[in-house]
Amino acid sequence: MKYNKATVIFLLCCLLAAPFSSCKKYLDMENPDTLFSEENIFSNVANATSATMGVYAMLSRVFNGGTIPTRFSLDSDEGWGTTGSGDNGQADISRYNINPTNNQLTLAFENLYLGIERANNCIKNIPKMNLYTNGSAAEQAALKRLHGEALTLRAFFYLELIKNWGDVPAPFEPSLDQKDLALPKTDRDQIYDRILADLKTAEDLVPWRGEGVAAVLDERLTRGSVKAIRAKIALYAAGYSLRKSRQMERRQDYLKLYEIVRDECRDIIQKPDKHRLNPSFKAVFKDNILAYKIEPNGEVLFETGVGRTAVEGSTGYIDGPRYVPVGLTALAGSGGSFHVLPSYLYAFSKYDTRRDVSFAPYNTNLNTMIRTPITMNSWVLGKFRLDWLNPLPNSTAQQWGVNTPLVRLPDVLLMFAEVENELNNGPTPEAIAAFEAVRKRAFLGNEDKMGATPADKEGFFAAVKNERWFEFAGEGIRKYDLIRWNQLGTRIAAAKAVLNQMLAKTPPYDNLPQTMWYKTNTPGDIVWGNALDEKTPSTPIPPGYAAIAWMSALNAKYIDNLAQGFQANKNELLPIPLTSINSNPNLTQDYGY
């Protein structure tokens, strides 16, 4: 059998996912014509599993390297990224000062397509395996699961391409089987319809969490994961997106897509033995994700499984607070890739437990566990803070193998609440129950302070939008929610308006503290000497306390940095990388780039 360079590269990637048992076996490998054949790679469950794990590996390249969660998903009304220098570097993506030569665009775009290529090979070959239909019951179940996983991962990669680039080329077969690799763009609605159908197939191939070949709990997809991803894809397909007309438009049949969202989410909600909320919002991150544990309740339906030594695992390093590693003396961690807006912080109720988990106002010396406050305009994301890591960091390495959650159960509950409200022209008891499940967990111990749930359609929709804002801080969701609601520009303008009110000390922001008092002479949380929501007392600073700039750190330049280059009906999408345009004569640059 003849093979070419593309085949060898792909199959080598698959083989590298599985360890070799000895150097001797590696050196004694068989003739390449046999070894590098599809029939050999997909000849048994172990090899097929290695090939599918190669598809999973692309998740961490895209989502744990910082590009999509901490670059592409900013700026919005939750935060802004590191200030761009105008040199078309990483930070300029967040500033909307982006052009097609940016290397971060190329990396994300190409890695997503590499994931699709790997998935296409698995989707083609796994169902053709003799064991798929004639193997033992265990072999058939394992291979069907792998087939369903490959279908689902391919669909997820396409979702990310469409969310960021709109219409894109859509290969659904391996490159070696395509007559022409220079594909033109495919209408996104056609891609959505195809992958929604694929996921309907995948649901029946992949078991529920804890059942059959999914009895061992790990980061792999289960039926609940597939259903949640199908719901999310249908939700985006139903939403607004920037079209070639340079207008934000939505499909006329969006309510039919909402029915898919409703039905898939309901199936998950009705399986509390498989997926339920962790009683503690903080525990999801501190006690599980940052402790390298599988969340035991099934709240995390889909996550990247990078492992503690993975080179892609920079989650927490670039977007969390800085720290002094154990045994060292200098600060590590770049931080600052996600600057929390004061307008976002003060949108939270002080009784909402998510606020003090989602945001971190300090740097930490891990040798003493003493936290030192940072100014209000320097606050960073706190969900993946590395001083919660177990074990603690003991070097300045940028990769700590922290998984990135991609779909959590609150997303399912709030997607259900949103579409149920729309389909029934108002919130049903089921919609209210789903919404309040998320809110009650957030206000644990202070449920009486969470406020009444609106009973009208518009009021409930507004409440759901806010709840998604509060729940998913820094998880790469908010900006894309605003785009599908056609509210990105509106919410950026609203955030700037609030920040300017804060700067001018106009009501209702005239009573915020300009300075905060604190002490850090003991390990653990910072002890504040005055309230976050009241004016700084006119009395002298209490003995043992120091002062740090709070609202007084806010300035006009900080506000101007937010979404500095944003243009409506353009920046809702990214430009196609120039390298891809130059290599494909059938690929066009649209949307004003």
Image (tube, rainbow, N blue to C red):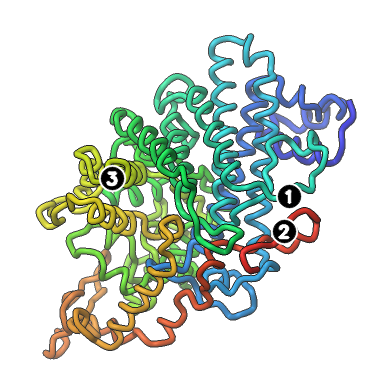
> At 69% from the left edge and 28% from the top edge, which residue is drawn?
124
Question: Looking at the image, is 489 positioned above or below residue 376?
Answer: above
Count of numbered circles in the view: 3
Name the spot of residue 27 as percent of width and height, x first: 82, 31
Secondary structure at badge 3 equals: helix
Quarter of image, res 514: bottom left
Residue that badge 3 annotates = 421
Label 2 crowd bin: few (<14), some (14–19), many (20+), radius 10 Å: some
Looking at the rendered image, the quarter that the C terminus falls into is bottom right
CA separation, marks 1 and 2? 8 Å
Residue underneath mark 2: 588
Nearest the eye: 14 or 186: 186
Q: Is residue 191 left or right of residue 513?
A: right
Q: Residues within 10 Å of mark 1 (few under 14, many from 20)?
A: some
Q: Between residue 211 and residue 412, name the one nearer to us.
A: 412
Residue 457 placement, left or right of 55: left
Vertical comparison of 562 with 292: above or below: below
The answer to which of 268 and 53 lies nearer the viewer is 268
Residue type at numbered disc 2: Thr
Distance (Cα) linking label 1 and label 3 = 38 Å
> In the rendered structure, are the residues bearing label 1 and label 3 in contact, judged by CB atoms less than 8 Å apart?
no
Which residue is at a point 67% across and 26% down the rendered structure image?
47
Residue drawn at (30%, 77%) of the image: 498
| Coordinates of residue 426 in the picture (x, y in percent) | 24, 46
Query: Can residue 386 be seen at all in this image of the molecule?
Result: no
N-term-proximal mark, 1 vs 3: 1
Residue furthest right in the image: 2
Q: Position of residue 466 (x, y in %)?
A: 29, 58
Of helix, strand and loop, which one carries label 2?
A: loop
Q: Which mark is residue 184?
A: 1
